Each structure stands twice: as structure tokens, then as C-alpha cells.
Image: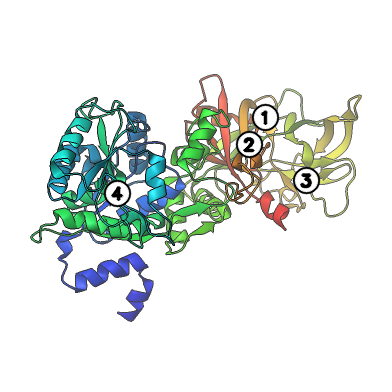
Amino acid sequence: MTEDKKSLNFLEQIIEEDLANGLPKDKLRFRFPPEPNGYLHIGHAASICLNFGLGLKYNAPVNLRFDDTNPAKEEQEYVDAIKFDVEWLGFKWDKELYSSDYFQQLYDWTLELIKEGKAYVDNQTSEEMAKQKGSPTEVGTDSPNRDRSIEENLDLFLRMKNGEFEEGSHVLRAKIDMKHVNMHMRDPILYRILKRKHHRTGNDWCIYPMYDWTHGESDYLEQVSHSICTLEFKSHRDLYDWYVDQVYDTTTLRPKQREFARRNLSYTVMSKRKLLQLVEEGVVNGWDDPRMPTISGLRRRGYTAESIKIFSETAGISKRDNVTDVALLEHCIKDDLNKTAPRVMAVLNPVKIIITNYPEEKEEFLDANYNDYEEGFGSRAVPFSREIYIEKEDFREEANKKFFRLKLGNEVRLKNAYIIKAESCLKDENGEITEIYCTYDEDSLSGSGTEASKRKVKGTLHWVSAKHAVKAEVRVYDRLFTDEAPDGHKDKDFKEFLNPDSLTVIDAFVEPSLKTANVLDRFQFQRLGYFCVDKDTTETKLVFNRTVPLRDSWAKKEK
């Protein structure tokens, strides 16, 4: 039992203690409550995996509830995207719910608060109210409107609801304690006026409840047992409890709010406001730009649902804010794709080789496995001919003994094919090598069983047949920011750290088997990295996104 306790995270320990103290297991219920004001990112994935993971662990239902109380920022597009992301990650919710489902109930409860003298209408400016709220070291002062009569407050609140006042002119505040040590308890706002069309309720309402009032009451209405929030809501817990206390019936379950640290990732920003800024200003090409930390962006880049879930589990949950190195996320996708992605050949920076002793009209189709180390991947026929492409950086006229690729007078093996020897090369007027002339050992074909095929040479290169090569656009993505914490500098704007090389678009050649690849199919381009078919692919144009290179170039930079 002691060992089991040690393996539990602190939230699971809280749940286990509640069960031990008499909470019936069938009363467990969790929820994931996103606001539909943007696309979900890798930080939300941690919360999704946590809440739905608890549901799976305890065989308990999990609600998907949209916190849609701000029509100025929320859209149906975001609702649809969130649902798609949660399902893509492999989770199923018990009930699809919306805070707007409870607008009438929240309003009715609010009337009761006013009648009990626990809420009042304030028509001061936001600046005046902020000044009266005090500071963490100074108590607040009462609003001059705090002692309005119940009748006047009911009348003003009804007029707010009926649209008689302009936005920002009146709010409804809870009457708690302006001297409370917790500033969230100093007469917080319950309702504000927003004359905006709501994506679900249309123009039925022009007053909308604040998050804190909506949050706890929604949990209570849904009988959520454990309301798990990110750490910034810890200071809101007193208010959460106070609000729930106003409506709590002892015959029902009382929800419990507990907090964990949000997932922060290095070399990116996680604020939806800042991500929206990148989208609106055209810094990136939409929410699903493969450089974005959004789930949709990661998916388009080639990340798998499994890799994101493994990342969330490996990074774990904490009680303290911290930054997770993006290298861990990259490790998780490499590890997953290493097991699942077929190996193919592509040349991103081509130079032509002409094999002078290979017959001009001859071509052959070589059998090549999609994975030399795992069974079940199958194989395909790779065409070979007199002219092939290799990577420019794989050839040097002269090189030291540590260079095991192609150089004049030396041999290398072509993957799944023959051993070739570089004899000479041709250059243009700028000194750039345009063609390399080689000879091949006809008896050295890989897997042929000849003595020549068993010869050991130190270098093996990937290649594509020039005659059969398929042109493809390859988008080489890198980290969006050059700084580990781009939004952590008070004196600088986060966009000052944008990486000018976060996207490089190149024309490449790929082997012809990839002509039939489908959008989101993932491959390892041998010796280069992992790549994914982009949604911009058409019948006449292949587009690949680089998910992650095989080697981390950033690790070298940081040393």
C-alpha cells in the first residue's frame, strides 16, 4: 500500500483520501472546461490528459464543458476545433455542456443573493473600483453604492438585464468583505453588461456572469466531485467555496477545487492572447501553422496523439510553476515515429551523380524494406538508373579521414543498391559542383549474396533515381522563437525573439513510392528526419512538413 501511495500523483492522493473518508466511488466526476476563445495548445493537452486520465483510472465520467461567458471573444469555430482535438487525442466525454446552459439558473440564484443582501449594483468606473480594492498589503474601502437597498439593487439589475444601460456603466458585485486578506474576496464582480451576440444564445442576454461565479456553480450543477484547475486559480479557491456555499444543499455533492501547475514549454508562448496576436498579424499562417504549440499545429506538423499523451505523462504534474524543455516533446515524437514511421528516401539539397559505367538505357527496381529493424512494415520497389541525386553535403572533392561520405577516389554504398566510387566532378563558373562522375561495382548489389556485396565500406548514402524522382515542396520548420522564454522579458516584446529561420521552403526530390501518400502520413526520410504530408498537398503537388530532425541542432547551439 505504501508503494502504491508513492506512485500516485498528489491529485490522485487527494482523490484516494476522499474515497477513504467516505466519498462513494460512483460519485466521482471530472470535467475539462475550456473557453472557446482560441485553439487548444500543448498546455491544454496536459489538462485534457489529466482529467480524462483520471476518468479512465477511476472509471468515472468526464464532462466537456465550454466556459462560454464572454461572447466578445468566443466563436463556434473554436468549439468545433476543441471537440476535434479532444477526440483526436483519443478521449470521449460523458456530456457535452456549456456554461450558457446555466444562464437562467445563474440569474435566478443571483436574484436570491440580491434579496439576501449579498449583492449590489455598482455604477462606478472600473478605475474607481480598482482604486478602492486596495492592495495585498492594504485593505480595500467600501463602494459608495455598497449599501443600496435591496429594492434599488433588484430594480437596477433588472434594468441591466433589459438592456437599459451601456456596456461598462453598471456591474453587479458580490457583497463579501472589502478588508479580506484575499483580494478576490473584496466584492468581486458577478455580472457585467456585454451587448454582443452569443454563439449559442444569440441576443437573449446582454448581461453575462463572470468566470468565478459561473465556474463553481456549474461544477455544482453537474455534481463534479473534483474541479481541477491550473495554479493561477489557487487564490480564487476562497471565492469558489464562498459561491458554492450560497447554493449548496447538504443532500448533494459539494465540489472540491484543487490546482496543479500549468504546462509551460520552452521556446514558445502559451498565452492564447499572444497566439491570437501571431495569427492576426500574419506572423504565422493560422492557428494550425506547424510552428504553433497548438494541438492542431502539432498534428499538422506530424505529431501523433500518442506522442502528446506520452509527453504529458512523462512531464507529469506539479504544484509549482516550471518550464518543460521542448526537447522532451521532440524526444517523445522521435521515439514514437521511430517505431511507427516507414523509412523512405528523399534528397533535400540535390546534386547529380552520373554512374559512367552503368548502361545508359538500363533501369532496375530494387527491393527495399520500409524498416530494416522491425517486421511488419513491408517493402517497396525503388527504381535505380544511371543518374541519381544525392545530398550536396554528402560529397567533397577532398576531405579528412573522418569524412565517411563520398569524396574523390573513395567508395560509399548507396542504400539498398551498389557501391560507387567518385572519379571526378564538374563545376559551374561560380565553383559550385553540378555533377559528380562515379563508377559502380556491378557485383556489389545489396542483398545479392555475392562476395562483392559483402564488402565493407564506411559510408552509406541515401539517394533517388533522377529519372524517377518526384518533385516535392518540403517545409523545414524550426522553433518559432530563439529565446527559451520569449515572454519572460519585462523590457522586451515577445515578438523580438521570433526566429527568422523558423520556416525554410525548399524544392526536393523524393522516391516515387510517395506519390500515393495521404495527408498526415508520416515517414522517416533516411538520415534527415521525420516528415509528414501536409494538407496543402494536391494531385499534382506533394508537400511535406518536417516534424523533427534526427539530430537536435539546438543542443549544439546551447553548449
Foreground tag (4 vs 3): 4
The residues bearing labels 1 and 3 have C-alpha atoms spaced at a distance of 26 Å
Query: Left or right: where does residue 353 sit relative to residue 499?
Result: right
Query: Which residue bears the numbered disc 1?
Result: 506
Would residue 53 be seen by someone viewing this image from the given angle? no
User: CA separation, marks 2 and 1?
Assistant: 8 Å
Q: Amino acid at mark 1?
A: Ile
Q: Which residue is mark 2?
A: 476
Residue type indicated by callout 4: Asp
Q: Which residue is mark 3?
A: 412
- Residue at figure coordinates x 73%, y 33% from the top left: 349
- Does label 4 or label 3 sit earlier along the sequence? 4
Image disc number at residue 212:
4
The residue nearer to you, when weighing 498 against 331, is 498
Q: CA distance from mark 1 to mark 4?
A: 49 Å
- Which residue is located at x 52 percent, y 25 percent? 537
Which badge, 2 or 3, comes first in the chain's sequence? 3
Left or right of 405 in this view: 203: left
Does 444 sit left or right of 523 as displayed? right
| Residue 64 appearing in the image | yes
